[in-house]
Every structure is written in structure tokens, then in C-alpha cells.
Image (cartoon, rainbow, N blue to C red):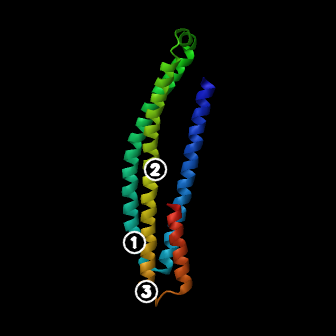
Amino acid sequence: QIINRLTSDLDKCKIILKLYSHILQACAALIGSVYVCASFNIYSLLSAPLMLVVGFYITYYYINAGRDLNRLDGISRTPIVTCFSETISGAPAIKAFKTQYYFKERFFKLLNNYYLVSSFKFGSANWYSLHLDFSSYLYSFFIIIFACVFRESVTAQAIGLLLKYSISFSEQM
């Protein structure tokens, strides 16, 4: 039991370290993209604070919703584990009284409740991803507008580089 707990804790630490590694990598890429865009067109910095505010607002909303959904996920998962362990320990009595159908239906009802919560969790993650993509595409749109407005002062190579890095901005979000 101690080894099981230790491996569970080590797995959680590994997941957290991997998550922080991806977050740091994405932040460095975002800062690099904004820096390159700003070095070629200083007006691209006008839209960056707007994108940060929108991104933080969307993230704040998603974190609050995700916290509640994770709590519901745990609440709906616990009865499944309890039902399964009760069924395993009481298997001889269940077979003796021929109540397999009742326990099977009960287990499937609990499983359906869990999948309902999981579908909301999956949907909220997709909602978050969609809105972050939309805000990053908005940044690319602003880069295109600024490149069109100030086309006399920006070369074609600079516009290509701006578009490449503004699109990589959307990939990193």
C-alpha cells in the first residue's frame, strides 16, 4: 500500500513537472513571437495587451469552471469504485440470490452519470481551446491590418516574418 501511494505521488509529480515544462516553453515561444513581431512593426505591440487581457479573462473563467467540474468528476467517480468493490466482495452472495442484473444496471447508471460529467469536462476544455484560438487569430488579424496600413514602411520579407510568427503565436496558445 505504501509503494502504491509512492508510485501514485511520483506519477503526479512527473505530470506536474511536464506541465510546467510545457507552460514555460509556450511562454518563451509567445514572448519570442511578440518580440519578433514588435521588432519589425512596433504597432503590433498595441494589440498584445488586449490579447493578454482576453487570454487571462478566458483562463480565469475556465479555471473556475474546471475546478467545479473536477470536483464533480471526483464525486461521480467515487460511487463507481464503491459499487465495483462491493460487487467484487459480494460476488458469491450476488450469484446465490441471482441479482446480477440489478448490480449490472446500477453500475451502468453510475457509469452514465460519470460519462455525463466527463462530457461536460471535455466540452469545457474544447471551449477554452476554441476561445484561445480565436483570441490568437485576432492577434494575427491585427498584425495583418497593421501591415496593410503601414505597408510603405514594411518590406515583403518583414510581412512574411510577421505573419509566420503571429501564426506561431496562435499555435503556442
Q: Which of marks 2 and 3 is nearer the N terminus?
A: 2
Q: What element carries label 3?
A: loop
Q: Nearer the viewer, residue 86 or 140?
A: 86
What distance separates the C-alpha of mark 3 from that of mark 1? 15 Å
Q: Position of residue 70 (x, y in %)?
A: 43, 39
Q: Where is residue 148 in the image (x, y as percent from the top left)?
A: 44, 84
Q: Nearer the viewer, residue 98 or 68?
A: 98
What distance separates the C-alpha of mark 2 from that of mark 3? 38 Å
**Which residue position is annotated with label 2?**
125
What distance separates the C-alpha of mark 1 from that of mark 2? 25 Å
**Which residue position is annotated with label 3?**
150
Q: Earlier in the sequence, mark 3 or mark 1?
A: 1
Residue 124 falls left or right of residue 7: left
**Which residue position is annotated with label 1?**
47
- Amino acid type shown at disc 1: Ser
Residue 132 falls left or right of residue 4: left
